[in-house]
Amino acid sequence: MFLLPAGLDVEFRYKERLLRTAELIEGKPPEEAIEALLSDPERVARYAEAPWQREFDRGLLTDLNTVGVPRAIRELVEDRPLTDRNDMAKVTAPTLMICRRGDVIHPAEIGEILVEIMPNAELLMFDDADDLLAAVPTIVARVNEFLRA
């Protein structure tokens, strides 16, 4: 099961940030929208710390839908997937969650809450994107093991 975004029963924390993203790309040709995103001051600050991430992001944005994405963002920030987070205790299937701190769409705090509520949940938590990327071989091995169980 996926909760996208993982919001549970709380207001979406990064609402203004994502709405700004929607405004940056809405109505622009794809390449212009991609440049607007890559030039956003928050991203530029991240790129100063991890220069490789700019080209990585550009690759992820290649097929950016400048009509659908802003519309989806506006719906996403108002969505409350659950009215009572304790309903997740009913999920008894083994669940593996992979989270990283600083993820705007899937806040790490949600993974920490869910692993406490769900009886058969396991959480792999990473401090940041670099930590997560460095752990990809370990993650792949754990996911493989999880799926075979």
Image (cartoon, rainbow, N blue to C red):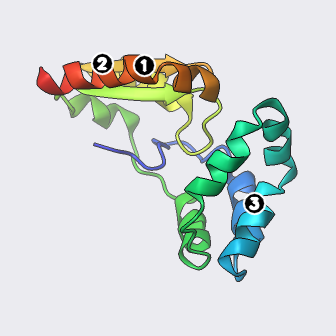
Tell me the kind of residue under disc 1: Leu
**Which labelled disc corresponds to residue 37?**
3
Q: Is residue 113 left or right of residue 1?
A: right
Rounded to the nearest whole Å, what is the CA distance between mark 2 and mark 3?
Answer: 33 Å
Between 85 and 111, the residue placed more toward the observer is: 111
* Quadrant assignment for the N terminus: top left
In primary-sequence order, the first of circles 1 and 3 is: 3
Disc 3, SS: helix
Residue 114, image x and y in percent? 39, 27
Q: Are marks 1 and 2 in contact (CB under 8 Å)?
A: yes
At 31% across and 26% down in the image, what residue appears?
96
Rounded to the nearest whole Å, what is the CA distance between mark 1 and mark 2?
Answer: 9 Å
Within 10 Å of disc 3 (Cα), the crowding (few <14, some 14-19, many 20+) is many
Within 10 Å of disc 2 (Cα), the crowding (few <14, some 14-19, many 20+) is some
In primary-sequence order, the first of circles 1 and 2 is: 1
Disc 1, SS: strand
Residue 88, image x and y in percent? 30, 34
The residue wearing badge 2 is 142
Tell me the kind of residue under disc 2: Arg
Tell me the kind of residue under disc 3: Leu
At 79% across and 37% down in the image, what residue appears?
46
Residue 48: image quadrant is top right
**Which labelled disc corresponds to residue 124?**
1
* Quadrant assignment for the C terminus: top left
Residue 23 visible (yes or no): no
In the image, residue 81 above or below residue 91: below
